[in-house]
Amino acid sequence: MDRRIRWAWWASVVLSTLGVMSIWLATMPRTVTMAADTASEPLAKGEFTVTISGPDTTKEGTDSRAFKAKITPLQSSPTYAWSWEAPEGAGNIPAVNFENADTAQTIVKTAHWFAIPDDDVAASHQSTYTISCTVTANGEEHVGSKQWVVFVPVATPEKPWGSVKDPKILITSLNVVQNTPPPNNLWRLGGIAGIQRNVPQPVYFLPAASQFTQKAHVHEERHVLQNTQGVGGIWKDTLWDAQKLYDNVLSKIQKATPQQVRDAVIAAVLEQNGADNITAKTLFQAAEEDAHRVSSDVEPWYLDWYAHTS
């Protein structure tokens, strides 16, 4: 076969084959795989959310930790306005004092407890505010909120708002001298110097800025008067009497050596302190009733532990 004829024949075969394949491919079903969009649908321009973070609780009378308003997504030139709410009918005038009420972050100065229910005995030691921040940006306004509890420590005899210890006879030094002249050369005390009635002062466990600190002060100072002057029928001023013990017992101690005198004096003081401590315990209930009658007249008129037990 002529070479030109053969090339023409092969070309016609190839073109025919390609034509058939193109027709076959055109009739084949086709599948297109699209990547799934797993991202959350973005907020439209100008839309955003506000989330408030910060302390869940704060002790009454102290500053809170920081409250923060977070905007998602970020917006240009936002403005902030912090606010608060308290339950309707709350007593003791709810109040929140923001250090900065127009910034993204703020604290509350001197957390204030309110009474709910408004009852001097039934009021809870915890008061719950709603803290909110209104954010305005790009013509949109949104609010975020959270609950915040202000609490007053529960006052009990074991964990009071304040405390004052009972007095006691205290030895700071002893002047031991020898009798003269012999043969009565025994040792004795040379006077009451170094032996006195110690009257402790109150200590307080509430923050200085607490609404209840003055109430606690009045209550504990009443106990001091009971211990020193005998008020309200509580005559604890007659207990732990160093002068009386010296006149009746200590001045009469005579021993062969100075150390024997010291030992005898210490033993007599410990015995007297122990006996007076027992007597004081029998007066505890009456002493608390008397102190409560005085401190209950001090505002705020809530949460006095004795009101819950009387």
Image (cartoon, helix red, strand yellow):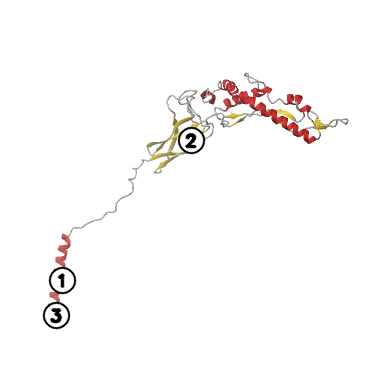
Q: Which residue is mark 3?
A: 3
With 203 as the anchor, is 6 left or right in this view? left
- SS for callout 2: strand
The alpha-carbon separation of the residues under discs 3 and 1 comes to 17 Å
Q: Are marks 2 and 1 in contact (CB under 8 Å)?
A: no
Disc on the earlier residue, 3 or 2: 3
Q: Residue at x 78, y 36 (%)?
A: 259
Q: Nearer the viewer, residue 149 or 134?
A: 149
Q: Position of residue 28 (x, y in %)?
A: 17, 60
Single out the mark in the foreground, 2 or 1.
2
Q: Examine the rendering and report whether any part of residue 278 can be seen.
A: yes
Residue 14 got which mark?
Answer: 1
C-alpha distance separating marks 3 and 2: 101 Å
Residue neighbourhood size for the residue with mark 1, other residues' Cα within 10 Å, grouped as few (<14), some (14–19), many (≥20): few
Q: Are marks 3 and 1 in contact (CB under 8 Å)?
A: no
On screen, residue 228 versus residue 211, left or right, reads right
Three-letter amino acid code at the position of disc 3: Arg
Q: Residues within 10 Å of mark 3 (few under 14, many from 20)?
A: few
Q: Is residue 25 left or right of residue 127?
A: left
Q: Nearer the viewer, residue 261 or 298?
A: 261
Mark before the other along the chain sequence, 3 or 1: 3
Q: Nearer the viewer, residue 54 or 47?
A: 54
Residue 57 tag number:
2
Q: Nearer the viewer, mark 3 or mark 1?
A: 1
The residues tagged by marks 2 and 1 sit, at their Cα atoms, a distance apart of 86 Å
Residue 85, x across and y down, in percent? 43, 30
Q: Quadrant where the N terminus lies?
A: bottom left
Q: Residue 290: image x %, image y %?
A: 59, 21
